[in-house]
Amino acid sequence: MKPCDRNIKSTIQLTKEMIKLADKGDIEREDTGCGILYGILRDCAYKLNKLAEMEKENHIKKGWWKGENTNGRSKRNSNRKKHFDCICR
């Protein structure tokens, strides 16, 4: 796998961890400030994930993405992410 593809894959994994942390933080929070923090973290994670999945799709279409089974997987994730129109500012 090319370094640029590894970085995209790592970014996707990082966004999954960000979502888990946002969910955990939201459950364990004790005030509204933390709720805002974890809401922003979650929104940013979904936006970054969407961008990374789109870039992965671009690499697959160009034939650059090697070493991973991609049959339908990315498209399914991409369609699922369309439900999240998040804004990270």
Image (cartoon, helix red, strand yellow):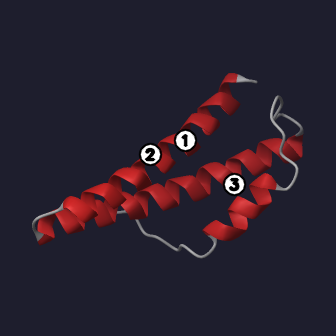
Earlier residue among tags 3 and 1: 1
Image x and y of residue 59, in percent: 79, 42
Most foreground residue, 27 or 57 = 27
Seen at 50% across and 60% down, the residue is 47
Q: Left or right of 51: which side holds 64? A: right
Q: From the image, tell me which residue sits under label 1.
A: 13
Q: Residue furthest left?
A: 31
Image x and y of residue 64, in percent: 84, 34
Badge 3: few (under 14), some or many (20 or more) residues near its Cα, within 10 Å? some
Q: Are marks 3 and 1 in contact (CB under 8 Å)?
A: no
Q: Amino acid at mark 1?
A: Gln
Label 1, label 2: how far apart the Cα atoms are:
6 Å
Seen at 62% across and 67% down, the residue is 81
Seen at 56% across and 35% down, the residue is 10
Q: Are marks 1 and 2 in contact (CB under 8 Å)?
A: yes
Label 3, label 1: how far apart the Cα atoms are:
14 Å
Image x and y of residue 18, in percent: 40, 49
Q: Left or right of 46: which side holds 70? A: right
Q: Where is residue 35, by image quadrant?
A: bottom left
Can you say which quadrant of the picture contains the N terminus? Answer: top right
Instruction: Point out the frontmost of discs 3 and 1.
Output: 1
Give SS at disc 3: helix
Q: From the image, tell me which residue sits under label 3.
A: 54
Most foreground residue, 49 or 59 = 49
Q: Amino acid at mark 3?
A: Met
Q: From the image, tell me which residue sits under label 2.
A: 17
